[in-house]
Structures are given as structure tokens and as C-alpha cells.
Image (cartoon, coloured by chain):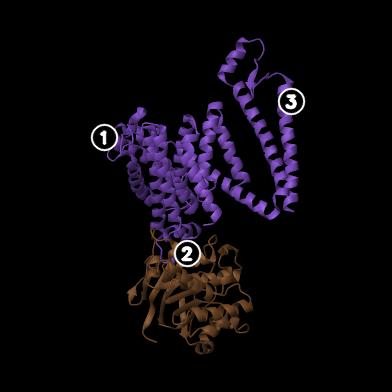
Chain colours: A purple, B brown
């Protein structure tokens, strides 16, 4: 490992350990969510990025981790099957077991058929769960309590944060080590050319099942941590949106690199935290972001950072920075224009607004960006068009500069 | 030279109603270099697929080292010590040349799918991979992704992957196809070097390669072996001349 990488890793870990002292309670809760999403995404990345198997139903393995843990917490009249800090082992074992069975079926096929099988398995659980209220608690779900253990009460977010952090870091370390074992390297070879591997003495189905089961095991650990954090479980965790979120997070971060999925998950969790309070259209923004990443930087955020670093090394900062600044400004203007349009439209078509408009003489103004906009006034739409125009102009200029830089 | 290391007995293969292998009997002695020649579509590659486990025969036996292996899985056959290459280059394109070779030696060194060994501390795996790397002449390209190699380099890597596991019987499917004259000459020298002390079976169209490398030549026509013997004998065989060599005699 390069020295710079190692320094960055220690600095990052140190920062994560210092976070509770730096963040307000709300953000600390978001950080716990981000850590859990990061582990889930890395587990998914093992399967999608390393083994080349695109699963569309990973919520299933996360979900069984959640439910197994909640039941383990409630075992022995609430005393718990294991001390609270060891609960994630329950998620690991359950994830592994379910992963072996599901993986045995799913990895019989590859490509689209594989994706469809994983989707079907997850949907099977999702539709079965409400019919088994004894296991999944029906609409109300199952709740549990974190029991004090090892001198800790686990009553505060800070303690839960550290519990989550330790498990996430340990799991990431194991996944990182796995990448450097014969098994990990053969997983890459499996992605590259399973047919050839068969003729080198390797049983590719077993190899595929192993990769699937290990990914599922760490997804189960992430599920456990979620159960510990929420002290509750609901079958909504099997929803297709959970499976979709881990795919989006991983690809936005970049499945090609080890920490890419974790980065994507962390960024998207905080993005959701910040934006979901401000607007009801945040899922739309998430989708737009995903489409843009896939179109313009298919290797994700980590891929973008890597290519930016390569550009800086090759051309130096002097020509690259102005071009980058132009690109960022163009993106900012176009982004603002998009948000402007989406928010105005969303409010214009909302029931509240239409009810207001029906009783008022003229369409009432809309509050946005700290200003009041009249939907009937030309100034509103001229502002939007000038944002788009300025953004497009800057984008064209930025594009020219990039071409000059790259010569 | 001792008894047969690989033996085909009455081997047949049909796809639907079409019989492509129509009763092949063949014996390979340990240490010999055996070439399969014949017109396109004669069934040479199908024979390779039947031996290596990609296809199961409709009838007949494949006996390897005294064990019947027909219908077994490719990885089981490989573990017994029989390795094959492919007509179309078949490597791990986004892994480096070195990783391609290291992946090929892990099984035979007993690491299998270990998830507790640190790959970079497996000195024997590294040594074996480096050794093959040196022998196939790709040391300069050690850290290049295999997909970025030139065609001839990829063929050399294909050969390296095939022999890296230490199999005793090597099946090469058209190892020099698509190569220039000088590349072919290099490839022949390389094949001769890396298959020393091993049994080699190859499908080959280039007659200079066949007659330069093989101890025994078998001629496959329409799913049958019509002749088998030393190169000189095959050259003189009237049946072969008529069926096959006639079209190529000028070129050879």
C-alpha cells in the first residue's frame, strides 16, 4: 500500500472516531445510517464489482439480518441471545446461511437471468413477510430493546455510533483482506472469464456461491446494525426500493474500487438527510444524479477523483483548475435551474396550491430560494431561462477549456 | 515411452441427428507430441471438447491414466492433470499478465479458494507464476492487463495459463492460428520448450508447424480418424493425400 493511501486511511479512521464530538445529534444519527449504508454497499460491491454479478434483490439479505437480530434481541424474554455488542454475529450467520441457499440457485445463471432470480427471491420474501406475522410482525413490525452489556448502557446515540463504527470498520477490513486472498483474486477471475476458470481446475459454481454468500453475510451484519440502531424491524426493509438504493449507492460511488460503494452510500445518505427535509422531490433528484453519474462518469465518484488526480499530475494545476472551476460553475447554474423548475412545478401541481389558487383571485406567489415567485409573471420564467442560458454558455466554454487542456 | 496416457475408444458425438464424431479410436503415449490435422469442420475441436469435458460424448470412452473421464466436469478433468488451450484467445482480460498466471497456479499448489492466506505472501505461487512468465517471454508485460497485449502475446499468455498448473497432458487448439511467419516460428519454439517432458496434443492447420513439431500425426476427416502415424508416413499416405493434403501439398 502506498504511503499516501495509508496516511489517508488513518486520517479517515481518526476522523470517524472523532465525529461524535464534532456533530450535533441529528447529524450523528445520519452518520450511523451512513456507516450502515456504507457497509451494505461494500458488501454489495463485492458481488457486483468484484464478482461481476448484478443482484437486484440485495434487500433480502440485509432484511434477514435485521429480523434475525430483532428476534435475537428479544430472545429469553428480552435478555438477548448474545450481549448487545456481539449481536451483529446473528446477522452474519443468518445472512451467510440465507446467502448460501439463495446463491446456490441464483448463481446457476449469469447476467440478466441472475439479476432476475435475485429480484424474484427478494420479491418472494417481500410478499411472504406480511403473511407471516409471527416472524415479521405484520404491518406493525417487531420491536426490541438494546440491553446494557460490558458496562455500557447503549442508551445514547454516541454509544450506538461507536458500536456501529467498530463493526463497520472490522467488516471493511475483512472484506479488504478477502480481496487479497486466493479466493478474492479468483472472484475477479470469475468475473473476467468463468469458462476459462473451469479449465484451470476451479469449480465456478462453488466460487460464485461463495462470493454471493460472503456478500450476503456482510449485508446481514449491516442489517443487524440497523436493527440495533432502530430497535425495531418492519417488513418494509424487504422493499425493492432498498435493493435499488444499494445498487444506486454502489454505482454512484464506483464499484470498480474497494471504497467506492462506501463513499457513494455515505454521500447519498447525507444527501437524503439534507434534501429530504427540504423537498418532497428528493427521490427525483437522487434518480437524476444517478443518471448523470452513469452517463458522464460511469466509473463513479471514485473514478472521477482518480481521473482528476491523473489530469492534475499530467498537466499541473495551472491549466486544470480554471477549467474545473468553469465546469463546476456551469454544473451549479444548470443544477439550480433544474431545482428551480422542479420545485415550481411540484408546488404548482400540489393539492395545497391548487386549493389556494381556487379561492384566490390570481395565482398566489410561491416561496423559493427566499424569494416570492408569481407563476403568471414573465420575470419568473425569464429568471429560469437566463439560468439555463448562462449555465449552457458556461458549459460550452468549460468544454472548450477541457479540450485545450487535454490538447 | 510407456503405455497410452490418453485413449479414445469408439468415441461418438451427435448434435441432434447430425453425427459429427463417428467412432474415433486413438492412443496417445506418454511424452509424445501428437498433431490432429484435417479439413475445417472435420471434428478436431469437437474431439478436444469431448476430451476436456466441455462436451459429453454420445457413446464411447475417454480413458486418461487408466481412468474413464468422459462426461466429467472440466475442472475435474483438469485436476487429473489434463489442461487445454482455446482456439479463440481465452484469458482474463482485465487482470494483469502476472495475475492471469497466478490465478492459474493456485489450485495445483493447494491454495484452492483459500480466504485465509494473504496472496502476496504466497512465495511459491509467485515463484511459479514468475517462472512461467519468464518462459513465455512476457516479463516486460508483467503488469499489463491481458486485454491490452498484442495478439501474439495473448496467444503466448494463453499457452502460459494452460501449462502453469503443471498438467502432464496439454491440449492446444490451433496455437499458431492468425500469426505471422516469424511469430509462428517463435510460437513453435515456445511450445517445444514448455511442453518438454509432457504429452502434447494439438490441432493445427499450419503444415510447417505440424511436421516440425509432431512425432505422430492423425488425420481427422468427417468425424473419423482415417490415418495415424509418423509425419513421413502420413505425408506418403495415399488416402490422406486424396482426402486432405492434396489441397495443401503446394503450400506445405
Image side of residue A205 versus residue A247, left or right: left
Q: Write down the chain letter for disc 2.
A: A
Marks 1 and 2, how far apart at CA: 52 Å
The percent position of residue A340, horizontal first and vertical second, equals: 65, 28
As displayed, is residue A211 above or below residue A229? below
* Residue A243 appears in the rendering: no
- Residue B55's disc number: none
Marks 3 and 1, how far apart at CA: 65 Å
Q: Write down the chain letter for disc 1.
A: A
Helix, strand or loop at label 3? It is helix
Q: Which residue is mark 3?
A: A382
- Residue A196's disc number: 2
For the residue pair B119 and B168, the one nearer the viewer reads as B119
Q: Quick check: do tags 3 and 2 share a chain?
A: yes
As displayed, is residue B76 above or below residue A139? below
Q: Could you tell me which residue is drawn at 54 percent across and 78 percent down?
A: B190
The percent position of residue B21, horizontal first and vertical second, equals: 44, 72
Marks 3 and 2, how far apart at CA: 61 Å
Whichever of labels 1 and 2 marks the residue nearer the N terminus, that label is 1
Q: Quick check: do tags 1 and 2 share a chain?
A: yes
As displayed, is residue A194 above or below residue B220? above
Image side of residue B120 versus residue A400, left or right: left
The percent position of residue A65, horizontal first and vertical second, equals: 36, 41
Q: Which residue is mark 1?
A: A79
Please tell me how crowded label 3 is: few (under 14), some (14-19), or many (20+) other residues with Cα within 10 Å.
few
Helix, strand or loop at label 1? It is loop
Whichever of labels 3 and 2 marks the residue nearer the N terminus, that label is 2
Amino acid at each position: 500500500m502506498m504511503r499516501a493511501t495509508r496516511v489517508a486511511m488513518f486520517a479517515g479512521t481518526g476522523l470517524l472516531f472523532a465525529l461524535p464530538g464534532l456533530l450535533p445529534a441529528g447529524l450523528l444519527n445520519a452518520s450511523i445510517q451512513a456507516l450502515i449504508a456504507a457497509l451494505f454497499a461494500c458488501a454489495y460491491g463485492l458481488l457486483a464489482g468484484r464478482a461481476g454479478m448484478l443482484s437486484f434483490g440485495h434487500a433480502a439479505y440485509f432484511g434477514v439480518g435485521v429480523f434475525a437480530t430483532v428476534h435475537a434481541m428479544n430472545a429469553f424474554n428480552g435478555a438477548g441471545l448474545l450481549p448487545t455488542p456481539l449481536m451483529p454475529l446473528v446477522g452474519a450467520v443468518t445472512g451467510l446461511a440465507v446467502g448460501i441457499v439463495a446463491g446456490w440457485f441464483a448463481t446457476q445463471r449469469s447476467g440478466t437471468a441472475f439479476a432476475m432470480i435475485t429480484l424474484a427471491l427478494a420479491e418472494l420474501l417481500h410478499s411472504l413477510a406480511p403473511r407471516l406475522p409471527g416472524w415479521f410482525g405484520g404491518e406493525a413490525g417487531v420491536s426490541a430493546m438494546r440491553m446494557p452489556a460490558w458496562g455500557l448502557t447503549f442508551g445514547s446515540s454516541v454509544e450506538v455510533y461507536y458500536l456501529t463504527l467498530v463493526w463497520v470498520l472490522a467488516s471493511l477490513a475483512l472484506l479488504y483482506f478477502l480481496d487479497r486472498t486466493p479466493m478474492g483474486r479468483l472472484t475477479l477471475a470469475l468475473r473476467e472469464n468463468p469458462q476459462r476458470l473451469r479449465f484451470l481446475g476451479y469449480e465456478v459454481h462453488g466460487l460464485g456461491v461463495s462470493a454471493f454468500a460472503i456478500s450476503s453475510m456482510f449485508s446481514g451484519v449491516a442489517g443487524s446494525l440497523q436493527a440495533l440502531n432502530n430497535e425495531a424491524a418492519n417488513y418494509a426493509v424487504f422493499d425493492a426500493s432498498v435493493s435499488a438504493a444499494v445498487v444506486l449507492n454502489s454505482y454512484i460511488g464506483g464499484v470498480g474500487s474497494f471504497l467506492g460503494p462506501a463513499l457513494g452510500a455515505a454521500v447519498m445518505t447525507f444527501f437524503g438527510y439534507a434534501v429530504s427535509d427540504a423537498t418532497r422531490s428528493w427521490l427525483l433528484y437522487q434518480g437524476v444524479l444517478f443518471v448523470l453519474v452513469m452517463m458522464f462518469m460511469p466509473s463513479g465518484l471514485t473514478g472521477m477523483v482518480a481521473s482528476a488526480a491523473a489530469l492534475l499530475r499530467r498537466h499541473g494545476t495551472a491549466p486544470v483548475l480554471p477549467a474545473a472551476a468553469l465546469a463546476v460553475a456551469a454544473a451549479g447554474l444548470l443544477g439550480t435551474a433544474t431545482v428551480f423548475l422542479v420545485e415550481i412545478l411540484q408546488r404548482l401541481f400540489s393539492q395545497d396550491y391548487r386549493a389556494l389558487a381556487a379561492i384566490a383571485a390570481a395565482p398566489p406567489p410561491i416561496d423559493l430560494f427566499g424569494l416570492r415567485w408569481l407563476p403568471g409573471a414573465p420575470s419568473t420564467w425569464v429568471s429560469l431561462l437566463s439560468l439555463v442560458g448562462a449555465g449552457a454558455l458556461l458549459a460550452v466554454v468549460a468544454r472548450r477549456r477541457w479540450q485545450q487542456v487535454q490538447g | 515411452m510407456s503405455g497410452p496416457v490418453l485413449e479414445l475408444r469408439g468415441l461418438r458425438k451427435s448434435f441432434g441427428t447430425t453425427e459429427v464424431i463417428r467412432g474415433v479410436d486413438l492412443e496417445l503415449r506418454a511424452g509424445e507430441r501428437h498433431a490432429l490435422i484435417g479439413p475445417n469442420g472435420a471434428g478436431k475441436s469437437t474431439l478436444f471438447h469431448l476430451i476436456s469435458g466441455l462436451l459429453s460424448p454420445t457413446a464411447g470412452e475417454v480413458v486418461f491414466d487408466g481412468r474413464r473421464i468422459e462426461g466429467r466436469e472440466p475442472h475435474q478433468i483438469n485436476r487429473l492433470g489434463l489442461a487445454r488451450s482455446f482456439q479463440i484467445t481465452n484469458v482474463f482480460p482485465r487482470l494483469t499478465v502476472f495475475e492471469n498466471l497466478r490465478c492459474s497456479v493456485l489450485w495445483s499448489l493447494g491454495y484452492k479458494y483459500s480466504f485465509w492466506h494473504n496472496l502476496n505472501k504466497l512465495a511459491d505461487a509467485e515463484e511459479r507464476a514468475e517462472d512461467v512468465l519468464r518462459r513465455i517471454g512476457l516479463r516486460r508485460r508483467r503488469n499489463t492487463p491481458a486485454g491490452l497485449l498484442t495478439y501474439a502475446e495473448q496467444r503466448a499468455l494463453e499457452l502460459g495459463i494452460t501449462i502453469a498448473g503443471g498438467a502432464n497432458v496439454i491440449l492446444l487448439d490451433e496455437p499458431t492460428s492468425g500469426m505471422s511467419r516469424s511469430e509462428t516460428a517463435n510460437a513453435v519454439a515456445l511450445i517445444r520448450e514448455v511442453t518438454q517432458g509432457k504429452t502434447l496434443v494439438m490441432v493445427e492447420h499450419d503444415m510447417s508447424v505440424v511436421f516440425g513439431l509432431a512425432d505422430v500425426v492423425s488425420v481427422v476427416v468427417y468425424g473419423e480418424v482415417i490415418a495415424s502415424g509418423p509425419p513421413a508416413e502420413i505425408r506418403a499416405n495415399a488416402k490422406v493425400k486424396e482426402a486432405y493434403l492434396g489441397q495443401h501439398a503446394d503450400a506445405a
